[in-house]
Image (tube, helix red, strand yellow):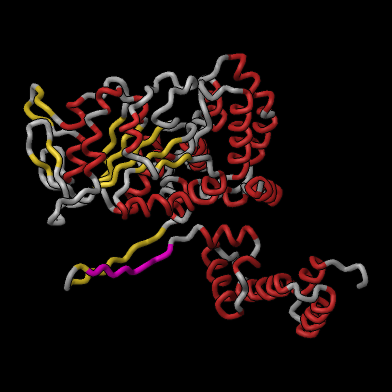
Amino acid sequence: MESITKKDLMDIASSSDNSIIQDLVKQKMQDEFQGDIVAQKMIQLSQLISQRNTNSNLDEEEVKRIVREEIETDKIKFDDLDESIKMMLNNQPTNVTITVKQGNTSKIFKQNTSPVFMRPFAQKILSDLLARNNVYLYGGAGTGKTYFAKQLSKFLGWDLITVSCNQFTSQLELIGGQTIDGYQEGKVIRAFGNLNPDGTPMGKGCILLLDELPKIDPNTAGILNSVLATIGEYDELGVPEPIQNSKGDKIQRGECFIIATGNALLNTKDAEYEANFKQDLSLQDRFTGSTYRLFVDESFEWNSILNQKWAFIFIYLNKLRKTIIDEGFTSKAFVSIRFMLSVQKTYNVFRVIKATSKTNPVIEQPNSLISYTPAPIPSAIYALEPSKVKTVKDSLEEFFGLFTSEQADILRVKTDYDSWLKIVAEKNKLPLDKLNSDAELLEIENFLRK
């Protein structure tokens, strides 16, 4: 046993039911790998799983439960765990009970925290929410600016009111006005006062999303200055300052949080984004101290959005994303998380339809880990021919069509697209729960560490 490796010892211990052999291996581990608690704990864990797994395969939830039990009883440090187990545990929501005291009354809230809001920049934005600061998020396409605002509205249980800013955004859309159908309340007013389109209270808070704010005409942007300045103000009696709609009505402030997004800073003119206007410094000042540049977070995409489904898609699309950036083709199209999700969902529908009998079609519940697909629409499921269902190749060809033919050819060659299609063909032969190979998971693990 002079040249025996740690893996050899672990394999012997986990596969043997003989207590004498297990004790000998543990002693050898202590002698050869003194202080390596991880190796010893992993032996114990594999033995425990083997004991509980005599008749059927353990599912992911059972593994998580066993790991948590072992951590609690044997005090394994979280950092001692394997990366794949850490990913599984990190991706779980945490239940928290919060007591809020207001005067002589106390209110108790139960809240689920999500991995979305554990990231450092998200923690800052939650701080801004409590401080009633306006937030400006900027960064390249596909960095998750709009996605974050949508997730925050769901997390808070608030309504999301979006203004898609451009040169034609009008006063009517922002603060309301008369139309041929009568008076129409503006989106900014509605968000500020927590109002439904008909002006009645909606009974919950609002996030006002000023999407692509740099594209708004600077003259129109001036209308926003009042609400942006008032959002955190109180009078001398501690009453929130109101604003006025276009009729002159005073609108009392409800629970409102303003998030603006863009691809560049507000007071700059970026040649790469021709539709942007250089905004006035007064508009930029409304977001001073809470302006954040976002970057693509591949780890979050893989673990919390794609839910690790599936490695062959994630690996190729990240290669494609990098090639588009390196070649300077981002003005044509980019690999966003929306596109990744689209390819993932398309593949899921493809596999489900391929496995469905036309004579007796039975579709399982929509998969919650893959955006609840396929949609439970029986007529569409029955009418869809397995030989004609959309494939991931169809999705990629549509995407390549956004580039010039020369650019598309460059992307296909530099990402080795033809080889990837061969990988897809092989994946089509495997069960969905066997698609992620150990080699692919290791490749992703190394990629995310960089």
Relative horizontal placement of residue 303, taking residue 215 as reference (left or right): right
Name the spot of residue 145 as percent of width and height, x first.
Answer: 42, 39
Q: Residue furthest right?
A: 2
The image quarter in which residue 134 lies: top left
Q: Nearer the viewer, residue 378 or 219?
A: 219
Is 97 within the magenta?
Answer: yes
Name the spot of residue 77 as percent of width and height, x first.
Answer: 61, 71
Q: Nearer the viewer, residue 284 or 443?
A: 284
Query: Residue at horizontal 43%, vertical 50%?
Result: 122
What is the magenta segment's predominant secondary structure?
A: strand
Q: Nearer the viewer, residue 388 or 15?
A: 15
Query: Residue at horizontal 27%, vertical 20%?
Result: 168
Q: Residue furthest front?
A: 236
Name the spot of residue 279 as percent of width and height, x first.
Answer: 35, 26
Does residue 132 sit above or below 173 in this rendering?
below
Assign the N terminus to one quadrant of the image. bottom right
Residue 345 can be seen, yes or no: no
The image quarter in which residue 4 lies: bottom right
Name the spot of residue 8 as percent of width and height, x first.
Answer: 82, 67
Query: Residue at horizontal 66%, vertical 33%?
Result: 420
Does residue 27 sit above or below 376 in this rendering?
below
Query: Residue at horizontal 26%, vertical 69%?
Result: 108
User: What residue span does the magenta drawing correspond to?
Assistant: 94-101
The image quarter in which residue 25 lies: bottom right
Relative horizontal placement of residue 128, taking residue 81 as reference (left or right): left
Is 375 within the magenta?
Answer: no
Q: Nearer the viewer, residue 301 or 51?
A: 301
Does residue 253 sit above or below 388 in this rendering?
below
Relative horizontal placement of residue 252, taking residue 106 as reference (left or right): left
